[in-house]
């Protein structure tokens, strides 16, 4: 109730916190600690070390610490414990790996992959060529409507938060788009009359997961 009504947390976050606290409860019971009043800052630090020894990811440990902080801060506010036992707990540093960048040869191979004549292959080719030519994000690519493409002038319009960006594309992207629109799109859209530029094989708007599946394949 505290998480939902006071902290305004989502149902997913509430469930995550409950799982984290259930895990902490199991650890405390294994240590023979019965009752919240017997928990100390040292106990909680020992639990963090336990998670690290179990090789939990830094992000998972950070979320566990957030769960404990929310719980013990609530207990402190309610007068159930003396002081905030989690005040000195520090989340581990999360090392973010730099994104892997494709070499020019890998980009060329990727663009050459969908080279067939099926509707799906023509769509995939158009998507990859347009993505490469414009540098737009995947979410922007799959959000494009037919009206956002100006083939004669060679540009697309990306719309985001009431803003518009006009982005030009070159000859290869134009060639792939023309081929897709003239020979493939109608077959894929299954006559559903959608205005989305790129659809999946069921005629529905392409999803991020669907696009990344194309890349993996």
Image: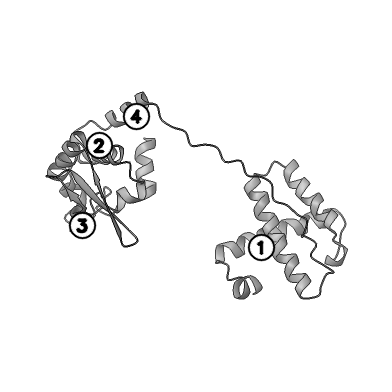
Label located before the other in sequence (2 or 1): 1
Element carrying mark 3: loop
Instruction: Name the element at disc 4.
Output: helix
Identify the mark nearer the N-term, 1 or 3: 1
Select label 4 or label 1 by which is in front.
4
Q: Quadrant of residue 64?
A: bottom right
Q: Which residue is under mark 2?
A: 125
Mark found first going from the N terminus, 4 or 1: 1
Quarter of the image with the C terminus is top left
Q: Relative to residue 201, is residue 175 depicted above or below?
A: above
Q: Is residue 86 above or below residue 186?
A: below
CA distance for labels 3 and 2: 19 Å
C-alpha span from label 4 to label 2: 13 Å
User: Which residue, given by chain and number where applicable, does mark 4 sit on?
Assistant: 107
Between the residue at mark 1 and the residue at mark 3, the CA separation in whole angstroms equals: 43 Å
* Residue carrying label 1: 18
Label 2 neighbour load within 10 Å: few <14, some 14-19, many 20+: many
Question: At 76% from the left edge and 73% from the top edge, which residue is drawn?
Answer: 77
Whole-percent x, y for residue 175 in the image: 16, 36
Mark 1 or mark 3, which is nearer to you?
Answer: 3
User: Which residue is nearer to you in this view: 148 or 153?
Assistant: 153
Tell me whether the residue at label 2 lies in contact with that at label 1, contact meaning CB atoms closer than 8 angstroms.
no
Given this view, does label 4 or label 2 mark the residue nearer the observer? Answer: 4
User: What colouring style does the render use?
Assistant: one colour
């Amino acid at each position: 109730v505290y998480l939902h009504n006071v902290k305004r947390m989502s149902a997913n976050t509430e469930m995550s916190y409950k799982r984290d606290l259930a895990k902490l409860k199991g650890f405390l019971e294994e240590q023979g600690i019965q009752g919240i009043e017997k928990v100390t800052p040292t106990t909680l630090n020992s639990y963090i070390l336990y998670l690290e020894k179990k090789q939990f990811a830094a992000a998972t440990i950070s979320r566990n610490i957030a769960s404990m902080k929310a719980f013990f801060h609530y207990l402190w506010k309610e007068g159930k414990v003396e002081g905030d036992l989690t005040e000195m707990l520090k989340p581990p540093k999360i090392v973010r790996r730099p994104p892997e960048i494709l070499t020019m040869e890998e980009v060329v191979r990727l663009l050459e992959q969908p080279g067939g004549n099926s509707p799906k292959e023509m769509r995939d080719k158009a998507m990859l060529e347009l993505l490469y030519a414009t540098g737009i994000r995947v979410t922007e690519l799959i959000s494009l409507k037919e009206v956002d493409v100006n083939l004669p002038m060679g540009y697309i319009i990306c719309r985001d938060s009431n803003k518009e960006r006009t982005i030009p594309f070159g000859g290869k992207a134009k060639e792939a788009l023309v081929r897709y629109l003239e020979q493939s799109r109608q077959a894929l859209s299954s006559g559903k009359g959608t205005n989305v530029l790129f659809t999946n094989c069921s005629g529905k708007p392409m999803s991020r997961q669907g696009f990344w599946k194309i890349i993996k394949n």
